[in-house]
Image (cartoon, rainbow, N blue to C red):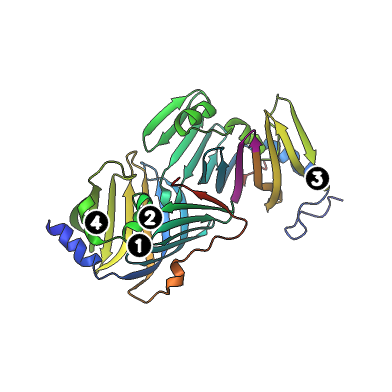
Amino acid sequence: CASRPPSHEDGPQPGQWDAQESTLEALERWQLVGKVGLRLPNDSTSANLDWHQGAAYYRMMLTGPFGSGRSVLEGRSDEVTLTTGEGRFEAETPEALMQEQLGWSLPVSSLHYWVRGLPAPDRASQREMDDRGFPAELDQDGWTIEYRDWTLVEDLWLPRRMVMTQDDVRATLVVNEWEPQVDND
Amino acid sequence: NEDADRLTDLLEPLETYRADFEQQILDGGGERLQEAQGRMWLSRPGLFRWEVDAPYQQEVVSDGDEVYLYDPDLEQVTVQSLDRRVTHTPALLLSGSTSDLTESYDVSHREQDGHDVFTLTPRDADTLFEELSMAFDDDRLTMLDMTDSTGQRTAIEFSSIEVNADIDDSQFEFDIPDGADVIREDE
């Protein structure tokens, strides 16, 4: 029943996830524009997110309105740097760097997979599918990720709204613009 | 100084200002990192509305007392007092009194391909930007440009500009949508 191509109006259909999962697993490069909302026990913040993902490099920029309060996280295979108004900082992992400099962190390395509806490899995870066979909830590394909404981009259903919670941290990611670079070689 | 007076002469007659904007964020090397478009309304003193239409939606409204940042995607409203917000919101500077502006910034003027460009450098260090420039085209503000300490730039270009047209006060009121998460940043 996945013969009909995906279409926006009818939303994700049974079978379409299985048909596209391998493409998503192979997806290595994308651009994404969205919002991150963060609820911490004693603080909350929100920021615009511009995520440029290459095969061996990523840049995730968080900005307030008017580009104020800019933080740019850049990752290469061996080095992760964070540039904020206060300067440029380096660390082994993005999580350590964010925690040090911003006082909060998101599991960026796992988000690389979660944002495609996939669990990060070689670690235990549990995934529940909804009645159309699309990921509804993913549990991994103590985080619970709920996939609330999907958007169709070039025949690929990609998450549009994700709510990630761990203990008393709650992060909402909303994607306003997805640009996957699918290599159909 | 003379340049500051000149800027004051340009800003003083400005009671209301309405324009479409195109905002770009560029890294130190000039590579474009982010782009957003929308509309801005301003009524001095202190009234301001900034609506981003694309690629996402966002609203910033100052009613002269508090500034509301509303994010419909996140269903979140952040409320902050106007004076705390001003140094983070260069466009909001325009809604302040001109004397505040010329008191808290060193002002220098230059001509650049037909534009009057004023460069403002903050006197106290804690503002988020190191340099702000305002470009005027025959007495009409057309561009705001801010550079921060790491060399990254936010450039805002205005078009379809209307100066001193009357703007209804309701444009600067913000009623918090029910169900929205309200975050007060002053407590």
Q: CA distance from mark 3 to mark 2?
A: 45 Å
Dot 3 and dot 2 residues touching (CB under 8 Å): no
Q: Are the numbered discs 2 and 1 placed on the same chain, yes or no?
A: yes
| Sequence-first tag of 4 and 1 | 1
Q: Are the numbered discs 3 and 1 placed on the same chain, yes or no?
A: no
Quarter of the image for residue B11 reads: bottom left
**Residue under pointer 4:** B100
Q: Which mark is residue A130?
A: 3
Residue span colored magenta: A165-179
Magenta residues, dominant SS class:
strand
Q: Quadrant of the N terminus of chain B?
A: bottom left
* Amino acid tagged 1: Gly
Q: Are the numbered discs 4 and 3 placed on the same chain, yes or no?
A: no
Q: CA distance from mark 2 to mark 1?
A: 8 Å
Callout in the foreground (4, 3)? 4
Image point (16%, 61%), residue name: B5
Residue B42 screen position, x and y as percent: 37, 66
Dot 2 and dot 1 residues touching (CB under 8 Å): yes
Residue B86 screen position, x and y as percent: 35, 53
Callout in the foreground (3, 2)? 2
